[in-house]
Amino acid sequence: MKLHLFHFHSSIDQSNQVSESESESAGCAVRRGAGVGTGVLVHYPYRLTDPGVQRACSQACSQAMEMKMKTLLFLVCIATVSSQDVHLSTEPEIRGTLSEKVSISCQISGKHSAERMTVRWLKGKQEVYTYQGASGTGKAGAAYLERANLVEKALSTGDVSLLLSNTTITDEGEYTCSVGSSALATTQLKLGSLGTRPILVMDKFGSVRSLSLSCKSEGWHPIPEVVWTAGDGQTLSGQPVKTSPGSTGLLNVLSSITLTVEDGSKVTCAIINPVLATKTQETLKISGDFPPDVSPWLIAFWIVFFIVLSVAGTVFYFFKKKLEAIKEKERQAKEAEREPLLGAHENKDKKETKEEYVKLKKELSEARVVNNSEWKRILSKKHVGISLTKGSEGPALAEGNHYWEVEVGEKKEWIVGVKKDGVTVTEKSSTSEGVWALSCSETTGYRALLPSPFPITPASPPRKLGCLLDYAEGQLTFYDADNRHRLYTFDTKFDAPLKSFYQ
């Protein structure tokens, strides 16, 4: 009997393969395609009765079966791992405090490790943070540099939560967490800011049985809820809440209520943040009669108020008269200077007129002087970003108080002030064209550029002009900065950004 013994090689050669029946006749059934590396069968004619041949045949069959089982097990493992699904869990809504750190949770179910996976966080279509498991590195999006990150130590437990620091209002919205190519989860981020403790202000007495109160606070986001309660805990009905934007981008809140005798002498204003579920409150307790039938303090207030109003009106009247007298004396003094050859008696009258003009001008100058405390307050508003030379403009100003100075020196021709962006300034410009400025000319002297130019009479030619802009109040005041004299104030309403200029 002949034995057909086969060696297995890594390449396939159909011409050297034998049939399944031939291999079985050798007592060793080796089938084609039994495992990795099978294919070429080399034929050796031996007798099955030889002991060495029997051992070789048995060993070859065992190795072929072992290779087949390992290959099968490997393919099963591959199929099991590739078919395993990744499920994510997160909270539908995350709440945090503005300007602080917030964690937006996202967890792989079963706490499977995410160290070798790709993790992405998106806000809408904007990239927030991407972690590449292949390299073990992460990168924040352009708008989240140094603010967005993952806790890499927690990736081994499947925690892929996003850490967001220094949060702003623009960070609010829907975030998407993705792991791998198919696992997605979304959550909503809401942020809030708790404002300042309320201030209760008594507005007015509505009658002998009621008074009006206001509750004010700053630094809120989003719009809060305001709750008024009486001393017995009963909720009172106030007017709708009014909000206005503050300088920091947060909201200022105002709520008003009319309190009656029936409501009691104690009232509390509580302001509640709907996102943070926190509140701040203030209580007012009214002692004595509520309200008093006749308030002696109220009577005294009105008496003093009318006295002050009368004094102010009187001062203004005489100031205006003195200003008119100064202008008249100035005209007469100039006329006297142009007529040096008049008679002795007439020259004497002109001289007295000029001396009276100088005296009145000095009095007006003293009335325009700014005191030390007021000047310090003005200098505290100095804008370091405005430094003007002739023919230049400053940055746009759309809010707040700003003070700057312009060196005009001995120049005889100049225009200094503010204007709306894009407006061309000439000597004929005025407030109606969006220009608020003072001008100096050898022919016209010092003038405020109004539709009808207003002449200004400084005590001495100013070498350095001070400019104080109060955008919200609509005021622009000019000063002789060296002598601390107020020259002129524009009162208006600004409705567009302004630019300082010197030309």
Image (cartoon, grey):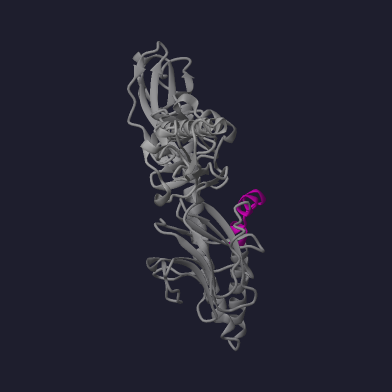
Highlighted range, magenta: 364-379
The N terminus sits in image quarter: top left
Residue 106 shows up from this direction:
no
Determine whether 109 is above or below 483 in the image: above
User: At which x and y percent is residue 21?
Assistant: 36, 36
Residue sitting nearer the eye, 216 or 395: 395
Could you tell me which residue is drawn at 55 percent across and 55 percent down?
Answer: 402
Could you tell me which residue is drawn at 45 percent across and 74 percent down?
Answer: 425
Number of callouts in the render? 0
Name the magenta segment's main secondary structure.
Answer: helix
Residue sitting nearer the eye, 28 or 289: 28
Q: Quadrant of residue 216?
A: top left
Q: Which residue is situated farthest in the top direction here?
A: 232
User: At which x and y percent is residue 203?
Assistant: 41, 30
Could you tell me which residue is drawn at 38 percent across and 44 percent down?
Answer: 124
Could you tell me which residue is drawn at 60 percent across and 74 percent down?
Answer: 354
Using residue 406 as the reference point, say whether residue 60 is left or right of it. left
Residue sitting nearer the eye, 394 or 469: 394
Confirm whether the magenta stretch covers residue 271.
no
Determine whether 359 is above or below 333 in the image: above
Q: Which residue is situated farthest in the bottom direction here?
A: 341
Determine whether 334 is above or below 106 in the image: below
User: At which x and y percent is residue 101?
Assistant: 54, 35
